[in-house]
Image (cartoon, rainbow, N blue to C red):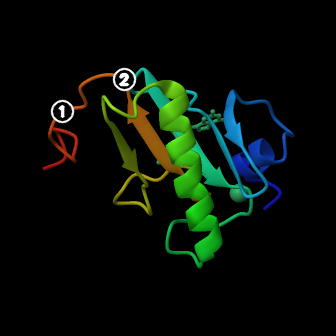
Amino acid sequence: MSDCIFCKIANHEIPSNVVFEDDEVIAFRDLDPQAPTHVLVIPKKHYANICDGVPAETLVAITHAISEVVKAEGIEESGYRVISNAGADAGQTVMHFHMHVLGGKNLGMGLLPADSE
Ligand code: 5GP
Ligand code: ZN
């Protein structure tokens, strides 16, 4: 996916604020953070969303990266939220599978934005 911005971030073709990286995945700070910690965890290979045939070992690598990120950010105990948008109704804007990891403040009880009903 030569025109995919997250593929370019994964390949270090464009800069990002990397907080964790291994062979399978990279985690970097969101450009427009919605919480004190707002990190995106992505597979280095391109998949459109979480159900786009992502191999089991890649999903395990993503889970491992999330655990490393929340430890490094100091939010393992205070709590955090993991979200993955897929498709138009979810408001996915970058069509490369990513997990948002949010924390560092009280995120509230709701799963949906207040104006979504
Ligand atoms: P989505 O709406 O697809 O679930 O989330 C895409 C996220 O990617 C947004 O939160 C947006 O701020 C972030 N984003 C978009 N382009 C870039 C970029 O070039 N660099 C970084 N670090 N984040 C980006
Ligand atoms: Zn991509």
The residue where tag 2 is placed is 104
Q: CA distance from mark 2 to mark 1?
A: 12 Å
Residue type, numbered disc 1: Gly
Q: Is residue 1 shown left or right of residue 29?
A: right
Q: Which mark is residue 108?
A: 1
Q: What residue is rendered at 59% in x and 48% in y?
A: 65
From the viewer's perspective, is residue 60 above or below residue 22? below
Residue nearest the observer in this picture, 62 or 34: 62
Residue shown at the point (62%, 59%) measured from the top left: 61
What amino acid type is highlighted by mark number 2? Gly
Of the pair 90 and 43, the residue shown nearer to us: 43
Residue at 39% of width from left, 50% of height from top? 83
- Circle 2 — which element? loop
Residue 32 visible, this angle: no
Mark 2 surroundings: few (<14), some (14-19) or many (≥20) residues within 10 A? some
Q: Quadrant of ligand 2?
A: bottom right
